[in-house]
């Protein structure tokens, strides 16, 4: 199952970043993959390293499983969970791609304060504020279930923490600064990663965070 998990990760990476990034550049003229580079030592860099390390750990976990170096945890070792992991991984990837297509020209991999992007609230964004990340979290959770060893679980937790920081400290403060009341109203209605959960309330705290950005 570790080999299949590796194939999934490479396929999702090739389609979700490679092919999608190429199409985005061809359609909108913006090199979204340039957002993968972040200046070392900045807040963006540390956050990127966090969720990047998590994703890498899941890939390493799949390699360890494939080579028989590290077995899956006994409590998670079952065909049913492996099959569930496949379904969640595929479903999460499809959801993330739907969200990216809905974002159209606004899709970015990092915050650029020189840009004035529109606020997207339709499609999957009517359900959660960050559906691309929700899909990514689900995809990596499914792959982690396929491997089900300690490295995969710790990697998934690290990835989720990194994405939480990305949204809370970078993206949402920027969107609130850019769209002000429109974002406040949107965030008060729609959950952050899960429908109904994480609806924004501490507006002043986020504004103070943005001023320190």
Image (tube, grey):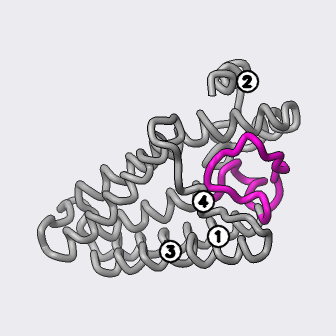
Q: Position of residue 6 (x, y in %)?
A: 34, 75
* Front one among 52 and 181: 52
Q: Position of residue 146 (x, y in %)?
A: 33, 70
Say which residue label 4 marks.
Answer: 34
- Disc number lying in front (2 or 4): 4
Q: CA distance from mark 1 to mark 2?
A: 30 Å
Say which residue label 3 marks.
Answer: 12
In the rendered image, the residue lying farthest to the left is 69
Position of the C terminus by quadrant: top right
Q: Position of residue 125 (x, y in %)?
A: 75, 55
Point out the stretch of residues depicted in magenta.
104-132
Say which residue label 1 marks.
Answer: 97
Position of the N terminus by quadrant: bottom left
Residue 147's quadrant in the figure?
bottom left
Q: Which mark is residue 203?
A: 2
* Front one among 193 and 104: 104
Residue 207's quadrant in the figure?
top right
Q: CA distance from mark 4 to mark 3?
A: 19 Å
On screen, residue 116 versus residue 192, left or right, reads right
> Which residue is drawn at the image coordinates 44% and 49% (left, top)?
51
| Disc 4 packing (10 Å; few <14; some 14–19; many ≥20) | few
Q: Earlier in the sequence, mark 2 or mark 4?
A: 4
* Callout 1 secondary element: helix
Q: CA distance from mark 2 to mark 3?
A: 35 Å
| Disc 3 packing (10 Å; few <14; some 14–19; many ≥20) | many
- Disc number lying in front (2 or 3): 3
Total of numbered circles in the picture? 4
* Front one among 97 and 192: 97
């Amino acid at each position: 199952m570790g080999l299949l998990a590796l194939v999934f990760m490479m396929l999702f990476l090739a389609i979700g970043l490679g092919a999608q990034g190429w199409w985005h550049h061809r359609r909108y003229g913006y090199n979204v993959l340039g957002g993968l580079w972040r200046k070392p030592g900045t807040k963006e860099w540390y956050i990127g390293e966090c969720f990047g390390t998590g994703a890498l750990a899941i890939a390493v976990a799949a390699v360890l499983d494939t080579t028989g170096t590290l077995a899956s945890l006994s409590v998670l070792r079952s065909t049913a969970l492996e099959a569930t992991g496949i379904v969640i991984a595929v479903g999460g990837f499809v959801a993330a791609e739907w969200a990216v297509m809905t974002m159209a020209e606004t899709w970015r991999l990092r915050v650029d304060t020189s840009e004035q992007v529109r606020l997207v609230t339709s499609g999957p964004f009517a359900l959660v504020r960050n559906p691309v990340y929700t899909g990514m979290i689900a995809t990596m959770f499914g792959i982690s279930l396929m491997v089900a060893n300690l490295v995969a679980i710790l990697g998934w937790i690290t990835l989720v923490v990194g994405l939480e920081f990305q949204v809370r400290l970078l993206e949402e403060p920027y969107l609130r600064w850019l769209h002000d009341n429109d974002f406040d109203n949107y965030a008060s209605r729609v959950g952050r990663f899960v429908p109904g959960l994480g609806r924004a309330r501490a507006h002043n705290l986020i504004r103070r965070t943005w001023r320190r950005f």
